[in-house]
Structure formats: C-alpha cells, structure tokens
Image (spheres, rainbow, N blue to C red):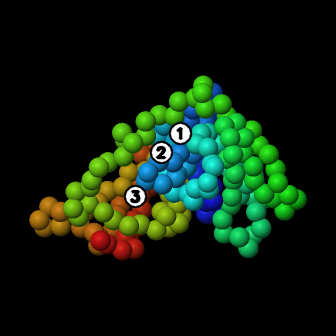
Amino acid sequence: MKFDKKHRIQSAASPDSTRYAISEVLFEKDDNGARLVATDGRILAIVPVEDADGDVPGFIERQTLVEATKGRLKSKPDAQLLLPEEGKALFETKAGMVEAKRPDAEHLRFPDYRGVIPDSYPKGMQITLSASKLRDLIDALGVAQDDMDGVTLRFQLDKLGQLDQHAPVRVQPCCASNEAFGVIMPISAE
C-alpha cells in the first residue's frame, strides 16, 4: 500500500489506547478502491491509498504509520507499507526493511463510519477557508489545544436567505469566558 506522506491520518485516530478499535487506523479495500480510515469519535478522516497486490485489509498501529512515513527518504513524496498477512506490516527505512506487528482484527470492530458521512449538501452551502489562516486565528483568539474547547463559525446570508460565499466568516471561541472573536475571509467560492 502506498500513501502520500503529507497525509498524517494517524492524527485522527483516538489517542486513548483503551478505545482499542479507534486508537488504530483501518486499512480497507473494496470495489471502490483502497483507503485508510481513522476516527477519535469526534472527527473522521478517510485517505485514498494505492493498493498493492496481496495487501490484507485490517488494522495498522498509529506508530507504524508514523515510522513508515518518517523512515522514507525526504525526496520521496510517498510512504509504502506492505501488508502481506493479517498481523504483519513491513516498511522500508533508510536502514532497510522493518517488520511491525498489526493489531488482531478478529478482536477489534471499527465503527460503521459510512453512516455519518452526509449523502449530499444543499446547493450553495460551501465555503473554502485557508486551514493555516484558521489555525492562526484560533491561536490568536487563545483557544486551548484540547478536545473540550472549540470555535463557532458564523456565516452571513445574502438578501435571498442563501449563504453568502464571499462574506467574511466570524470565528468565536465556544468557551463562555472568552469574549474574543475574529474574522476570516473565504479563499474561494463554488
């Protein structure tokens, strides 16, 4: 299985090792292709990957993905994991091939993530924001870097009551003690 090193899907998996099924990353394949899937119960990430013949679906430890990505030459944009059998993962580092153990899929059941993916979105309900600028704004507003803090995004409507895709978006911390707020401009509208 090959995947782009820029995708750090393990970041979406639960850091809580007692939540076994979601503290690992799922590798699955079907008629629609192959993908890595991770969730912590609040966010879900799905990354398409290039399937190699013989790769066996199942779980991959977060740390294995970190090591497989870190161990690649900087000049190569992709990382490669070989998943020849259940319970085994192989990846190449500068020092050679490394074998890692895969979690036992028989005792883990990944949540049915397809049920939370919206089938469609209302027309005109899409705004594209710069992720780095949104992170900068969140930092500037003093929002804590943990699960229990967050931000509310407020969008403006046009005269017809539709989402105004060109209007600034108000960003406000959710915590009651923080009255700060900011504004971010969309980078494109579709």
Q: Amino acid at mark 1?
A: Asp
Secondary structure beneath dot 3 equals strand
Tags 1 and 2 in contact by the CB under 8 Å rule? yes
Image quadrant holding the N terminus, namely bottom right
Residue 62 in percent (x, y) is at 67, 44
Res 70 quadrant in image: bottom right
Residue at position x 45%, y 43% from top?
175
- Compared with 81, 132 (above or below) is below
Image quadrant holding the C terminus, namely bottom left
- Answer whether residue 12 is visible to the viewer in this image: no
Residue 151 in percent (x, y) is at 43, 50
Q: Which numbered tag is attached to residue 40?
A: 1
Residue at position x 61%, y 54% from top?
53
Q: Residue furthest front?
A: 53
Res 180 quadrant in image: bottom left
Measure the alpha-carbon separation of dots 1 and 2: 6 Å
Density class for disc 1 (Cα within 10 Å; few <14, some 14-19, many ≥20) is some
Nearest to N terminus: mark 3 or mark 2: 2
